[in-house]
Image: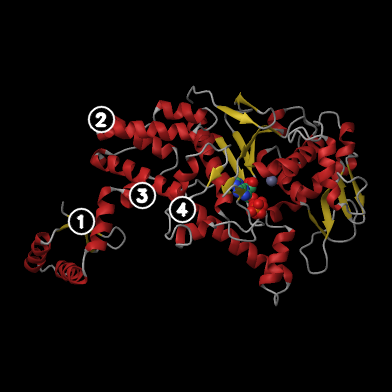
Amino acid sequence: MSQETLRLHNTLTRTKEDFRPIDPANVRMYVCGPTVYDYAHIGNARPVIVFDVLFRLLRHIYGENHVTYVRNITDVDDKINARAARDYPDLPLNEAIAKVTEKTEAQFHADIAAFGVLPPSAEPRATGHIEEMKAIIERLVARGVAYVAEDHVLFSPGAMDARGKAPKYGTLARRSLDEMLAGARVDVAPYKRDPMDFVLWKPSKEGEPGWESPCGIAAKGRPGWHIECSAMAMAKLLEPFGGGLACEDPMKNVFDIHGGGIDLVFPHHENEIAQSCCAFDTGRMANFWLHNGFLMVEGEKMSKSLGNFVTINELLATDSFGGRSWPGEVLRLAMLRTHYRQPIDWTVKALEEAEKTLRGWANVLELNQTAFTHDYAPAPEVIDALCDDLNTPQVIADLHGLAADARKGDFSAACVLHGSLSLLGFDVGKLLSSHGEAAVRAAAAELVATPEIKALMDARLVARRAKNWAESDRLRDELAKMGFAAKDGKDPATGEPITEWKIIR
Ligand SMILES: Nc1ncnc2c1ncn2[C@@H]1O[C@H](COP(=O)(O)OP(=O)(O)OP(=O)(O)O)[C@@H](O)[C@H]1O
Ligand SMILES: [Zn+2]
């Protein structure tokens, strides 16, 4: 284990604090994942990338096998039901829902794979943890902080003071009761005793997904959104339910880091805290709460409801943003240019700059690539910057410095640049093959070559594959005179001879 002190901004205290894990042998982090009913937009990608950087840093500090990162999939939600009914009107709702969630989840995984994010240690689905949700709900009712009304179960923040250790409701969000009440009064259901009360369980209509209800409710029902995360975090990060629930030991009932977008602070995370602290008899659900800022478009939060969004898939695979598609690593770097708590303005210019930066780094690495035979250590200043509340803009400035030294022939700077990029989640091999000098020149040759020249290139490949060396050499020399140099190799997948053409300078 290395000695760096990791400092993280904790939303609970609104300050940067030294991070000390409850158990360094198992550092535990939970991040709220997507609700799977539609393509994820690039705003949704921000927490995915930011918490991947934190996961990598924690693994670097505490060891690869000493960090547990849980990111859930919310696959039971009214938005999913609505989308399923709209998209598959002829199917029974449950089948339609399965289609929507499976398709969306697969799409989400395919999209974020392009960013080079590590898979979380566990990715629980809400529907896989209904029993734990029901057990927590029963416990909350037994403790007098939740009640049954008209086949619903509601959590009552007003009753929380009765629960010794739980923090005052509103502690995370730092909102006054009046402010929270103003929000809650907008839509008060008749079965609520108080406008602040929120749903833990609600009845399902005929045809909607439904499970046997807790607390003696006869009708089938389904969980509310907030209880899903309390249950999944418990299932994956705490002692098994039924074990030391009323236990003082934070190793058992508290975990280290809870993350998500800043929009989740209230009510979602406030409610998760209320539920978990009351159920498990603790003063905290997690020690650190981290929230990423918004990704903005022309001054507004990118969001599905505003309709001002661009999906990850559109950026990767279509020309709808800036008239071209963008590689995943460019999107990743564009995201990390801004500190995770600041808003990001998502522009074509920023993506172009990120791509130019990657090209510069790839070229510097390419100059030295023959010697890249093993994994390299990252730069100490890069670790320091990351340990300062994930200061990725500073990291990028450091990488520019390393690249400048490497360009002047400092080979060790190139190695450290290599190691630092890897730590930050960039695949250096991929950078070289898609942004390096050879790749750029091959792409340029592709653009410059006329159909006649392309025909000569094809003819040479045919001759080479037929082992007709005389003809193959003749065509190579002819093309060289026209300004195109051949780089012969083999297709790594099939072993077939292939040729890359570069422009001779
Ligand atoms: N514009 C944004 N910038 C940064 N993070 C965002 C943005 N929009 C959503 N998120 C985050 O993405 C994650 C997934 O959230 P979720 O699936 O609930 O998004 P959503 O509610 O569909 O977004 P929207 O606001 O577009 O309806 C959450 O952590 C959320 O905070
Ligand atoms: Zn959540």
Q: Which residue is mark 2?
A: 410
Q: Are marks 1 and 3 in contact (CB under 8 Å)?
A: no
The disc placed on residue 110 is: none
The disc placed on residue 502 is: 1
Q: Which residue is mark 4?
A: 114
Label located before the other in sequence (2 or 4): 4
Q: What SS does tag 3 mark?
A: helix
Mark 1 to mark 4 CA distance (whole Å) = 27 Å
Q: Nearer the viewer, mark 1 or mark 4?
A: 1
Q: What SS does tag 1 mark?
A: strand
Residue at the far front: name it.
Answer: 298
What residue type is disc 4 on?
A: Ala
Which residue is pictured at 61% across the width and 28% down the height?
21
Q: Nearer the viewer, mark 1 or mark 3?
A: 1
The disc placed on residue 430 is: 3
Which residue is pictured at 32% across the width and 38% down the height?
374
Left or right of residue 336: residue 18: right
Mark 3 to mark 4 CA distance (whole Å) = 11 Å
